[in-house]
Image (cartoon, coloured by chain):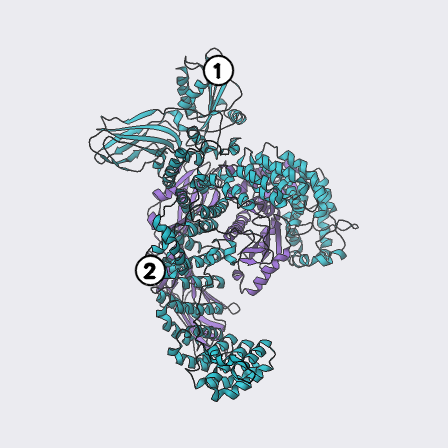
Chain colours: A purple, B cyan
């Protein structure tokens, strides 16, 4: 166990290491003294013991430090800490870091982080001060550190290495412009960028206001606000198709591109459906409690407005039924598989993108199956059977049938593989939730508003 | 290939040539040495481009074991980088710094560049500067002397007018860990703690723990600064100040008293990370200051729970006596904390939700703890790491407060796709939740789990079944039968685990289960797992009387295989032989002797020792002592059945949600959760002085908006509530009561809370602005809404109270007073059918159910007038009639005061020229000659605050319109002979024009 330091040091996160799943430390940052990267050996040790990266314990105690890590996009984000700190605090922060990278670079991967290592460093510098979170709102960060764009990197390339400066870019742009008048707006923007730096010089006003999530001076020519109501069905069905457990989890993802300081109010036709909710900090909780409307000044760009849970007591409509029979014969090292998936309560919509995934027992050598619709693959290494059905047809119900061959001599597997179902239904929120209207105050223009509904399978599992 | 363009052409070529050798080189650099080739300060991405992706990154393996080989390798230098840094082209410098930072990021040593880098600390390009800061923070500690070169730049930065620069200078200064500059740091922190920008003050709070860890001797001085920062009333600073408090002096709980209510009230607006720190600290605080709300728990009749919480009961009994004397009443401050944290359960941040959950678990009355269950269950949808931590905490909670998770039982059902560590924790929770009513459902679930492919999980499930069986007597036989069936499984892990669990279960009632024991005796031929073999042998030995025929036979088989057995099995064979010898010596004497002699020459000393010990005990020789008389008692004593316990039992002595709780071991810096005090500590310590409550009340409005302005109020943070002065008993006690009442209402967003004009809350809530002259408007003008004649006895008046409208800052607060002149009572007073101009909004007051005759009541409603003087029309309804009424605001009420310094005022005024400026000359009225009368007149005409200014001739006022927040600036310049000039600058011209009219009218009277 780490020694109790005599002087209570309150650095929360001492150091951060980014480690690829192959065990390669490709970025380190220290907020206090440098901690040797050998500390990650304890992580590698735990990784060796765990069957999958997901099974590496998020908190590892080492003789002098504690490692708190999250695994995301095939990268371990490892925070080294020395003293007591709520583990969730660190975990939540690390996820926020990953989301920021995602937001900045379009993907959170080893390659994109390495490509943008300077921006990553500048971001981490702003996100943590002395190991304590400082600015984690994407709107604020983007005002301080500009995200890379293709244009910006072009400009950086020109101004950076060729010593052109704004004048030079202008000449360069003009020479390009004459050959191609189509891209004139792009080139204008290029000129605009050439004069600016990647780093903001002023403190973002959001940082000081009580709406830190919104940047100031937002301007759009087309003012639009889109809301996606995405619902996921989490369900466990038993062998005979009965519901063991089912609930609906939903989120409202928003993409708001509105000028100025719009104050929005989103109301639902049937807000009582929502059993448990959690909000983006912009939502005024008091108004939700009193009137069941979402009143908020939105951040600029993409964000998750709320997530909710639909009361489990209400019956959850399960859009598909699954009939399955997977059996292994007592002798002969073989077995049979027969799966049928059909539409059930679909509210008149089409069920799309249906995929059935089965983790087969280790002794299964190969599968010789015939699908009546779609395609199937069986990976004999990972033992995963994937049946990609596609659209469900009311008339002809898809079926997958055939024989399984087992390792000869191996005992008959006792365990039953369970079926994981993926599906998607457009233009339907399976809970029946409906947005009533969206009002905007505080700005004069008329925004374009849109709401989309999608239902997906969440953790949808059929036991056999 | 874009990025290649960034490299100087020569560099590119060199990279190509250097590639091969570079691979082998260590990243550790030494500054001396001969000319080296251009070394790759190139970012890995560039290298990757060059190598067309066929090589894995070089930084991994060689970097780690590089230390040893470093010395042999030709030292590398960064001449090109130095050159670039020395050049006067900023773009080159920037490029160089970017490469250096990339090196640092990969953990490569760049310390030899220190002199070249530190020169650029004063570079004008802000990005270069920032990167130099990054470099300095990393290497200053190693090169303290050179680092001193940069200090003067930071000192200059600390005085910069740009708050971002001031703050970042302080950040770097406090991060570079150079001991010589400790006095400079101390000074800088002290200064920054009183900076007018809250952002700089926040940075100061962050710097405190840094300085403290550098020099713990400064603790006392730093505590003074912390004390000052804790009184800060901006949400931006609150979290960081508490963080500094926790880092430096968590034991000084006395510093919190005066700030307690303020922190509770600010909490919802603090940024999420600050919330976590504050909530955790307040949990500890509450444990020292309030009484245990569950003192009476033992008398609450909840039969089954009672026996479950065996440990609680003792506690309860002790306090029972005490309790009878004095029923428990919750301190209003305790209630305030619980109330204000509750809505944070809806936060998107899992850490905040967990912090509130642990607060409720540790502080709330038992009946209220349940609210956290739903939020915690919600977190289980989150990332698997979050799930892991939450489940650990739920596991602990579910032992103590089982009832609250029972409705969510199904949420803990396990999916085959969950990682094993999550599965095991869910299993733990399910086991803790099992009781007579749900056990059948849980066992059915467990049955499906046993068929899982994840064998570790199956083993854990079998253990869980065992625990359910011991805890719930009714299902013991069912479980036992189920487990016996598992014995025929072909998976050894399953069988072994079952044996171990069955052994424990059989101990409870062996007599009925001799057939199971027989069955298990048969298994010994097949099972290879040592623990299982040992368990079977122990069982047969223990209950050899139930299986008198089989036991000797088993021993015979074991004697044959003795030498090949594992140690634990050997020990159990010895055990078995001894027990059989004692009960059935006729058949087993020879076997026992044989086994004992085998054991005598065993390699393991435990086995040898045990053999010697047993031989002496059971086979008396003449030398042996008295002990062998008792051998039978020793070996065949009745053993108590084992208690199968949750590993999470009693873990709640650690604060939940903490690292220590997760590890079940005290982590460094962990602050113990104190036990509840026996007697109430003095609650009056939390009272904030209210001697000047009246004055503060009037400044309230300004404060409400102060957060949204940039650099406001230079004195605000210095405005520590002075602890001297009259602590009048009466005022403080009355305060206490009303505060709790109104606060709880307020956070529900009910506007009626405003009706309680409570000076204490005002001081808590905000008013961080202290001005020399505060606007005075002694009497609020009351307008008539409904005359008593038209209202048939109901008279309604309204006034603009100039308080901020708490539920929505964009609304104007309208205070409405109902007076019932009728003989009968008026019922159901409420607002209906507002007919509003577009954009206008109304926040109705809650319905007044009853107004007795002759009485009056005041309520508060909010109206967003959209910065226009259009009337808001609505229907005022009683239980019998509806009246159409309208509220028309004077233009002066559409704004709220803003505190501003003179400079800021002039700057803003400069931006509102031309169309936005209206000038009027006027002649001051007779009564309106003196400076203070002018101030009084203007502030009563419009809700503005005065701007301090040096000149006698000028009075300045500032405000913001309530809806859009447009600035309203008013200047009155007097010119000797009764004439004066009025200037109004406002973005909204209509407002400006109307305001000019009103002020002219007010001043010329």
Percent x, y for residue B848? 28, 37
Up-down relation of residue B794 to residue B750 (above or below): above
The residue most toward the left is B823
Q: Which residue is mark 1?
A: B974
Quadrant in which the C terminus of chain B is drawn = top left
A7 or A409, which is in the foreground? A7
In the picture, measured across the screen, residue B242 lies left or right of residue A336, that is right
Percent x, y for residue B75? 76, 52
Q: Which residue is mark 2?
A: B303
Asked where in the image residue A153 lies, by quadrant, the reply is: top right
Percent x, y for residue B850? 25, 36
B199 or A161, which is in the foreground? B199
The mark closer to the camera, 2 or 1, is: 2
**Pointer 2 and pointer 1 on the same chain:** yes
Give the tally of numbered discs: 2
In the picture, measured across the screen, residue B63 lies left or right of residue A281, that is right
Asked where in the image residue B449 lies, by quadrant, the reply is: bottom left
Report if residue A427 is visible in the image: no
In the picture, measured across the screen, residue B835 lies left or right of residue A308, that is left
Dot 2 alpha-carbon crowd within 10 angstroms: few under 14, some 14 to 19, many 20 or more: few
User: Residue A175, labelled with which disc?
Assistant: none
Cα–Cα gap, marks 2 and 1: 81 Å
A243 or B813, which is in the foreground? B813
Up-down relation of residue A306 to residue B906 (above or below): below
Report if residue B588 is visible in the image: yes
Percent x, y for residue B893? 39, 27
Secondary structure at badge 1 equals strand
Up-down relation of residue A249 to residue B688 (above or below): below
Chain name for mark 1: B
In the picture, measured across the screen, residue B431 lies left or right of residue A68, that is left
In the rendered structure, which disc, 2 or 1, sits on the residue that comes first in sequence? 2
Secondary structure at badge 2 equals helix
């Amino acid at each position: 166990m780490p020694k109790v330091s005599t002087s209570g040091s309150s650095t929360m996160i001492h150091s951060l290491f980014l480690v690829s799943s192959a065990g390669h430390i490709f970025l380190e940052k220290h907020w206090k003294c440098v901690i040797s990267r050998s500390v990650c050996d304890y992580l590698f040790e735990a990784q060796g013991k765990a069957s999958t990266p997901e099974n590496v314990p998020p908190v590892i105690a080492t003789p002098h430090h504690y490692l708190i890590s999250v695994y995301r996009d095939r990268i371990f984000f490892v925070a080294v800490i020395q003293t007591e700190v709520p583990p969730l605090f660190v975990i939540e922060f690390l996820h926020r870091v990953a989301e920021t990278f995602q937001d900045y670079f379009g993907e959170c991967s080893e390659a994109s982080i390495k490509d943008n290592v300077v921006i990553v460093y500048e971001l981490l510098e702003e996100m943590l001060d002395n190991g304590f979170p400082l600015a984690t709102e994407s709107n604020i960060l983007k005002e301080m550190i500009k995200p890379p764009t293709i244009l910006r990197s072009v400009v950086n390339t020109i101004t950076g290495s060729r010593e052109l400066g704004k004048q030079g870019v202008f000449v360069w742009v003009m020479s390009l412009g004459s050959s191609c008048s189509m891209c004139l707006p792009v080139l204008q923007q290029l000129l605009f960028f050439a004069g600016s730096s990647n780093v903001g010089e002023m403190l973002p006003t959001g940082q000081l206001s009580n709406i830190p999530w919104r940047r100031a001076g937002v301007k759009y020519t087309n003012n639009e606000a889109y809301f996606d109501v995405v619902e996921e069905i989490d369900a466990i069905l038993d062998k005979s198709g009965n519901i063991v457990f089912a609930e609906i989890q939903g989120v409202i993802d928003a993409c708001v591109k509105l000028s100025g300081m719009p104050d929005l109010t989103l109301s639902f036709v049937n807000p009582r459906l929502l059993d448990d909710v959690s909000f983006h900090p912009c939502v005024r909780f008091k108004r939700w409690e009193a009137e069941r409307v979402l009143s908020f000044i939105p951040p600029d760009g993409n964000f998750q407005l709320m997530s909710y849970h639909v009361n489990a007591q209400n019956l959850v409509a399960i859009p598909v039924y699954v009939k399955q029979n997977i059996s292994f014969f007592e002798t002969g090292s073989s077995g049979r598989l027969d799966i049928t998936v059909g539409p059930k309560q679909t509210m008149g919509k089409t069920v799309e993108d249906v995929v059935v995934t089965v983790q087969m027992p280790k002794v299964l050598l190969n599968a010789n199956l015939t699908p009546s619709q779609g395609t199937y693959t069986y990976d004999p290494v990972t033992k995963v059977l994937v049946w990609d059905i596609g659209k469900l047809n009311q008339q002809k119900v898809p079926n997958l049938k055939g024989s399984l061959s087992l390792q000869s001599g191996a005992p008959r597997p006792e365990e039953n593989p369970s079926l994981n179902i993926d599906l998607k239904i457009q233009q339907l929120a399976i809970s029946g939730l409906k947005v009533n209207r969206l009002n905007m105050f505080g700005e004069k223009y008329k925004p374009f508003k849109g709401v989309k509904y999608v239902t997906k399978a969440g953790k949808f599992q059929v036991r056999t | 290939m874009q990025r290649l363009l960034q490299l100087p052409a020569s560099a590119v070529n060199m990279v190509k040539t250097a590639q091969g050798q570079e691979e082998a080189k260590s990243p550790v650099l030494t500054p001396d040495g001969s000319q080296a080739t251009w070394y790759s300060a190139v970012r890995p991405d560039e290298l990757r481009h060059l190598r067309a992706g066929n090589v894995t990154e070089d930084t991994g393996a060689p970097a780690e074991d590089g230390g040893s080989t470093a010395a042999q390798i030709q030292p590398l230098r960064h001449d090109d980088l130095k050159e670039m840094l020395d050049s006067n082209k900023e773009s080159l410098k920037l490029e160089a710094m970017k490469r250096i930072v990339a090196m640092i990021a990969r953990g490569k040593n760049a310390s030899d560049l220190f002199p070249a880098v530190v020169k650029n600390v004063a570079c004008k390009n802000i990005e270069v500067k920032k990167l130099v800061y990054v470099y300095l923070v990393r290497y200053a500690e190693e090169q303290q002397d050179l680092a001193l070169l940069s200090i003067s730049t930071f000192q200059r930065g600390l005085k910069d007018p740009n708050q971002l620069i001031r703050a970042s200078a302080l950040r770097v200064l406090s991060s570079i860990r150079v001991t010589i500059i400790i006095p400079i740091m101390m000074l800088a922190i002290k200064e920054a703690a009183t900076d007018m920008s809250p952002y700089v003050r926040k940075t100061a709070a962050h710097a405190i723990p840094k300085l403290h860890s550098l020099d713990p001797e400064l603790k006392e001085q730093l505590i003074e600064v912390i004390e000052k920062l804790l009184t800060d009333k901006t949400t931006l600073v609150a979290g960081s100040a508490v963080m500094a408090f926790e880092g430096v002096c968590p034991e000084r709980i006395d510093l919190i008293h005066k700030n307690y209510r303020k922190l509770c009230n600010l909490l919802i607006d603090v940024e999420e990370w600050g919330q976590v720190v504050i909530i955790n600290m307040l949990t500890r605080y509450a444990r020292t200051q309030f009484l245990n709300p569950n003192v009476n728990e033992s008398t609450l009749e909840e039969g089954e729970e009672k026996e479950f919480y065996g440990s609680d009961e003792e506690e309860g009994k002790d306090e029972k006596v005490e309790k009878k004397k004095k029923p428990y009443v919750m301190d209003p401050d305790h209630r305030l904390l619980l109330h204000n944290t509750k809505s944070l359960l809806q936060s998107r941040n899992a850490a905040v939700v967990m912090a509130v959950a642990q607060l409720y678990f540790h502080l709330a009355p038992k009946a209220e703890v349940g609210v956290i269950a739903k939020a915690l269950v919600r977190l289980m949808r989150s990332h698997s790491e979050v799930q892991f931590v939450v489940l650990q905490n739920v596991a602990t909670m579910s032992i103590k407060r089982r009832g609250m998770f029972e409705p969510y039982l199904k949420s803990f059902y396990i999916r085959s796709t969950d990682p094993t560590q999550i599965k095991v924790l869910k299993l733990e929770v399910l086991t803790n939740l099992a009781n007579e009513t749900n056990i059948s459902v849980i066992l059915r679930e467990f049955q499906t789990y046993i068929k899982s492919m994840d064998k570790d999980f199956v083993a854990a499930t079998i253990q869980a079944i065992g625990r359910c069986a011991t805890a719930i007597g009714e299902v013991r036989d069912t479980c036992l039968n189920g487990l016996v069936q598992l014995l025929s499984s072909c998976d050894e892990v399953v069988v072994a685990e079952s044996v171990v669990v069955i052994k424990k279960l059989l101990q409870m009632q062996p007599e009925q289960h001799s057939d199971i024991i027989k069955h298990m005796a048969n298994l010994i031929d097949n099972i290879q797992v040592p623990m299982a073999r040992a368990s079977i042998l122990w069982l047969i030995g223990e209950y050899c009387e139930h299986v008198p025929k089989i036991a000797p036979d088993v021993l015979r088989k074991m004697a044959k295989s003795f030498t090949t057995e594992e140690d634990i099995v050997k020990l159990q064979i010895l055990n078995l032989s001894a027990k059989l010898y004692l009960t059935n010596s006729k058949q087993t004497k020879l076997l026992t002797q044989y086994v004992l002699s085998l054991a005598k020459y065993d390699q393991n000393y435990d086995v040898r020792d045990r053999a010697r010990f047993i031989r002496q005990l059971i086979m008396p020789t003449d030398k042996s002592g008295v002990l062998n008389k008792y051998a039978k008692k020793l070996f065949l004593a009745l053993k108590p059945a084992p208690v199968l316990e949750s590993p999470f039992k009693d873990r709640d002595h650690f604060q939940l949600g903490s690292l220590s709780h997760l590890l079940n071991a005290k982590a460094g810096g962990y602050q113990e959760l104190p036990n509840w005090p026996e007697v109430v500590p003095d609650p009056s310590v939390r009272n904030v002085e209210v001697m000047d409550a009246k004055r503060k009340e009037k400044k309230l409005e300004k404060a409400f908006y102060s957060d949204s302005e940039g650099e406001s109020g230079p004195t605000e943070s210095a405005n520590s509530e002075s602890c001297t002065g009259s602590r009048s008993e009466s005022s403080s006690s009355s305060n206490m009561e009303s505060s709790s009442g109104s606060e709880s209402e307020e956070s529900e967003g009910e506007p009626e809370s405003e009706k309680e004009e409570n000076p204490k809350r005002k001081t808590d809530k905000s008013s961080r602005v202290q001005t020399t002259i505060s606007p005075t408007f002694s009497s609020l003008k009351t307008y008539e809404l409904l005359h008593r004649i038209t209202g048939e006895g109901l008279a309604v008046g309204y006034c603009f109270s100039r308080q901020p409208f708490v539920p929505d800052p964009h609304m104007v607060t309208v205070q409405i007073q109902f007076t019932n002149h009728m003989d009968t009572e008026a019922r159901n007073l409420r607002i209906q059918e507002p007919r509003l101009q577009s954009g206008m909004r109304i926040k109705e007051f809650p319905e007044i159910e009853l107004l007795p005759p002759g009485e009056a009541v005041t309520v508060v409603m909010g109206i967003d007038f959209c910065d226009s003087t259009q009337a808001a029309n609505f229907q005022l309804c009683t239980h019998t009639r509806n009246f159409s009424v309208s509220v028309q605001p004077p233009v002066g009420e559409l704004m709220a005061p803003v505190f501003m310094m003179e400079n800021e005022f002039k700057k803003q005024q400069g931006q509102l020229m031309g169309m936005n400026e209206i000038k009027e000359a006027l002649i001051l009225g007779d009564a309106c000659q003196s400076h203070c009368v002018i101030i009084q007149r203007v502030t009563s005409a419009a809700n503005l605050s005065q701007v301090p200014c040096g000149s006698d001739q000028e009075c300045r006022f500032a405000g913001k319109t309530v809806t859009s927040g447009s600035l309203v600036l008013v200047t009155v310049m007097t010119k000797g002979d009764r004439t004066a000039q009025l200037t109004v600058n406002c973005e909204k011209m209509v407002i400006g024009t109307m305001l000019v009219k009103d002020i002219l009218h007010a001043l010329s009277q």
